[in-house]
Image (cartoon, helix red, strand yellow):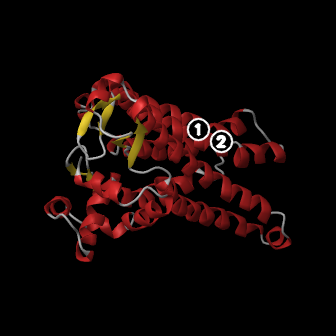
Amino acid sequence: MDDNLLQWKSRGQSFLSRLRTWFNLLDATLLLSSDAEILKAHALLGSKERLNEKDEAAVTLSLSSFHPDSGAALPLIFRPPAYFPISGPLVVASLLPHSAVKPALFWQFLLQSYNAGFNHMNRNTSAEEVKKTSLKHLLLIAGTVSYTTSVGALPQILINRLRVRSPPLQMFCRSILPIPLSAALAFFSVLTIRTEETETGIQVFDYNGNPVGISKAAGEKAVWETGLSRAVLFGMTTAVPNLLVLLLQRTRFFQINSLLVAPCRHLSVALVFWLMIPVSFSFFSQVGTIKRESVEEELLAGAFGEELYYHRGL
């Protein structure tokens, strides 16, 4: 088991401990570190049996920027600390009440493309078949981006094509429909981009960190957990600001100062998205567990303990 995974395993399985860790790992200043510094930090994890407080910076850098399956530093724009600085503005822009279809498609395309790339680069690549990206998988990624872009712009397409003028229907299309749509598309993107893990399986480990074999059941569990966490992230980011704006519009102050509604919407989207990123990343541990009886029979002979462990990916 890679030293990064051993660190995740030793840092506890509770939600609050993972949340504290992710708040540290999402520090944007970590993006200033070079690949050489990241590799050096990861090497430090395996060189010492016990890490002291001075080594905590190296642990944080390694966990935030090193991929435990590929053995290399993640590409700069797809490291977890880069997720909010890049996708935050795209999320805000994609949720704007556009007046035409083309701007809605444009921002959805940028957002869905980045999410697809992030899902792909942070997937589990422990199986040999997954280490290299095949042409088939590239076509799948392109198809996923095209589909999620079109469906993501569906509210604006409905308003324009059906010429919706009724305020209640416009409110439904702009404020209600995007909530389940955003959550479903985020889940769908993870599920399709990481479909190879469910087909070929991922490496599972026993309690001592020894590799046991490749399990499709663990791969399916890892993908579904990640998909659910991403659905919560985008569902909440869409729901809370929209509901907040609907409440603000009923107050006398915002009825008089209606121009303040739009800035409040944009700020609330950015704030909720920023808060929900560490929360959603913390829902499931990076080192997931699966019951011994849930994996394939051929793996049971070499399995030690009641539970097996796997790298969930992000």
Q: Are marks 1 and 2 in contact (CB under 8 Å)?
A: yes
Tell me the kind of residue under disc 2: Pro
User: Residue 310, percent across and down?
Assistant: 34, 41
Q: Is residue 64 above or below residue 299?
A: below
Q: Is residue 243 above or below residue 165?
A: below
The residue drawn where x is 60% and y is 60% is 269
Q: Residues within 10 Å of mark 1 (few under 14, many from 20)?
A: many
Residue 195 appears in the figure: no
Q: Is residue 15 above or below residue 70?
A: below
Question: Dot 1: what SS?
Answer: helix
User: Residue 305, percent across and down?
Assistant: 34, 40
On residue 170, the disc is none
Q: CA distance from mark 1 to mark 2?
A: 6 Å
| The one of 297 and 240 positioned closer to us in this rendering | 297
Residue 234 appears in the figure: yes
Task: Tell whether 149 sits left or right of 29.
Answer: right
On residue 184, the disc is 1
Task: Tell whether 282 sits left or right of 63.
Answer: right
Question: Dot 2: what SS?
Answer: helix
The residue drawn where x is 55% and y is 34% is 150
- For disc 2, the marked residue is 180
Dividing the picture into quadrants, the one containing residue 211 is: top left
Tell me the kind of residue under disc 1: Ala
The residue drawn where x is 57% and y is 65% is 271
| The one of 149 and 71 positioned closer to us in this rendering | 71
User: Residue 8, percent across and down?
Assistant: 34, 56
